[in-house]
């Protein structure tokens, strides 16, 4: 089995650890350990009968709930089979431009989606530790820009002041898959500005915050003309009935949202402080639910040791060319699990 490009590949991890998948503690995929919310499970249980019918191809109810959440009209929102699906359509639009600018490192799926439509890509370096970047180009109308905020894998949150000057590009796609981990007053989302920019597309995922990677649900916010075009390109029912009802439910689950915001900050700071004490490691304190850590021990070596000795999976960064063996990424989990990881990492150095 070849080394995975994404986090969360438990089948691969289990072959290295020599144990069943369920015994692995997964720090490699940045998924909220408090979820899925009870409301999601209850919604699935009470809607099993909907499996007998095709979903509404317009997803009218779901779009209306999402629209209410974001104070928009439903025709500005389209749900998708995770951000991964919506990225494909965004990339089809971006590929019409002369080129698309990406920060580097970037989530690997951006390149996959752009290459699928023969899109030209130009990479611009992100200062991994400080989070600074700059993109200077001529003929902005002919260029696309694909940003990720907060940024994966560093966790840097770019401010609106930093991003707004770049909305002069012909097409701007902002992947806010991890934005909901930040309490609303501190979020730097562009959603409130969407109606001012017909050239802006915002992507949101329910995978990470609501711990639903297996359900596949996310949504795009953009000018209705863009979304109508995508609707004609894609298959008629990309979201299954259970994902549809769960999305409507969890997006309104205030209790779960509050619990998550309360858990994340102290848990992340504690793990950050602990790791900072180890001279081999230099963690970056980002705003999302993971930490990128610079390591003086090759990350693939650490990953293998932790899998075999502790059945813990961390994310090596070999799929990010700029990071290679010098970095690993870990999700923030419960206090007990974070402590287990910290002890395992300390032991792996001996
Ligand atoms: C930055 C980023 N965007 C999008 C995705 C995909 O999200 P989804 O599960 O909604 O397809 C990921 C998954 O790891 C991600 O890291």
Image (tube, rainbow, N blue to C red):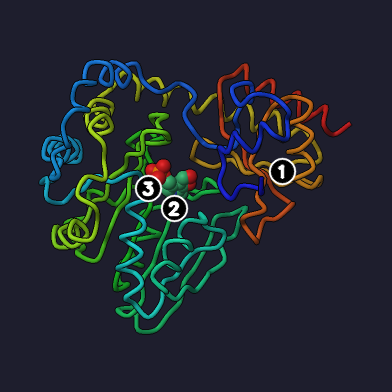
Alpha carbon separation for disc pair 1 and 3: 26 Å
Residue 178 in view in this figure: no
Question: In front here: 158 or 92?
Answer: 92
Q: Secondary structure at mark 3?
A: loop
Tags 1 and 3 in contact by the CB under 8 Å rule?
no
Q: Is mark 3 within 8 Å of ligand 1?
A: no
Q: Residue furthest bottom?
A: 138
Occupied quadrant, residue 139: bottom left
Q: Nearer the viewer, mark 1 or mark 3?
A: 3
Residue 198 in view in this figure: yes
Occupied quadrant, residue 43: top left
Question: Where is residue 211 shown, x and y percent of the image?
Answer: 42, 29
Q: Which mark is residue 176?
A: 3
Question: In front here: 134 or 2?
Answer: 2
Question: Does 343 sit left or right of 337 as displayed?
Answer: right
Identify whether 280 is placed above or below 190: above
Q: Quadrant of the C terminus?
A: top right
Alpha carbon separation for disc pair 2 and 3: 11 Å
For mark 2, what is the residue? 158
Q: Residues within 10 Å of mark 1 (few under 14, many from 20)?
A: some
For mark 1, what is the residue? 282
Q: Which tag, 1 or 2, sits closer to the chain's start?
A: 2
Q: Is mark 2 within 8 Å of ligand 1?
A: no
Alpha carbon separation for disc pair 1 and 2: 21 Å
Question: Does 219 sit left or right of 278 as displayed?
Answer: left
Identify whether 99 is placed above or below 25: below
Tags 2 and 3 in contact by the CB under 8 Å rule?
no
Question: Where is residue 147 shown, x and y percent of the image?
Answer: 42, 59
Q: Secondary structure at mark 1?
A: strand
Q: Residues within 10 Å of mark 2 (few under 14, many from 20)?
A: many
The residue under the point 64% across, 24% down is: 20
């Amino acid at each position: 089995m070849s080394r995975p490009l994404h986090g969360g590949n438990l089948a691969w991890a289990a072959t290295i650890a020599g144990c069943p998948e369920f015994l692995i503690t997964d720090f490699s995929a940045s998924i909220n350990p408090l979820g899925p919310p009870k409301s999601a499970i209850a919604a699935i249980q009470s809607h099993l009968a909907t499996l007998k019918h095709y979903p509404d191809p317009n997803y009218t109810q779901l779009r209306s709930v999402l629209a209410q959440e974001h104070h928009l009209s439903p025709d500005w929102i389209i749900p998708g089979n995770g951000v991964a699906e919506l990225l494909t359509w965004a990339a089809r639009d971006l590929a019409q431009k002369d080129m698309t600018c990406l920060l580097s490192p970037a989530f690997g799926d951006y390149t996959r989606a752009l290459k699928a439509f023969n899109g030209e890509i130009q990479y611009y370096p992100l200062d991994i530790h400080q989070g600074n970047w700059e993109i200077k180009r001529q003929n902005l109308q002919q260029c696309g820009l694909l940003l990720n905020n907060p940024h994966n894998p560093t966790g840097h949150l770019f401010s609106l002041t930093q991003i707004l000057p770049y909305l002069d590009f012909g097409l701007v796609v902002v992947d806010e898959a991890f934005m909901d981990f930040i309490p609303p007053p501190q979020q730097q989302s562009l959603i409130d500005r969407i109606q001012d920019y017909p050239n802006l597309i915002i992507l949101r995922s329910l995978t990470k915050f609501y711990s639903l990677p297996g359900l596949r649900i996310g949504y795009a916010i953009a000018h209705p003309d863009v979304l109508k075009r995508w609707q004609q390109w894609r298959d008629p029912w990309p979201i299954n009935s259970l994902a549809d009802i769960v999305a409507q439910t969890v997006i309104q689950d205030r209790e779960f949202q509050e619990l998550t915001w309360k858990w994340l900050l102290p848990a992340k700071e504690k793990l950050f402080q602990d790791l900072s004490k180890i001279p081999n490691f230099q963690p970056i304190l980002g705003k999302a639910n993971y930490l990128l850590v610079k390591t003086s021990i090759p990350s693939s070596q650490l990953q293998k040791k932790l899998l075999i000795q502790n059945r813990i999976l961390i994310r090596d960064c070999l799929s990010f060319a700029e990071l290679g063996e010098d970095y690993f990424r870990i999700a923030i989990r419960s206090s007990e699990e974070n402590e287990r990881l910290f002890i395992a990492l300390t032991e792996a150095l001996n």
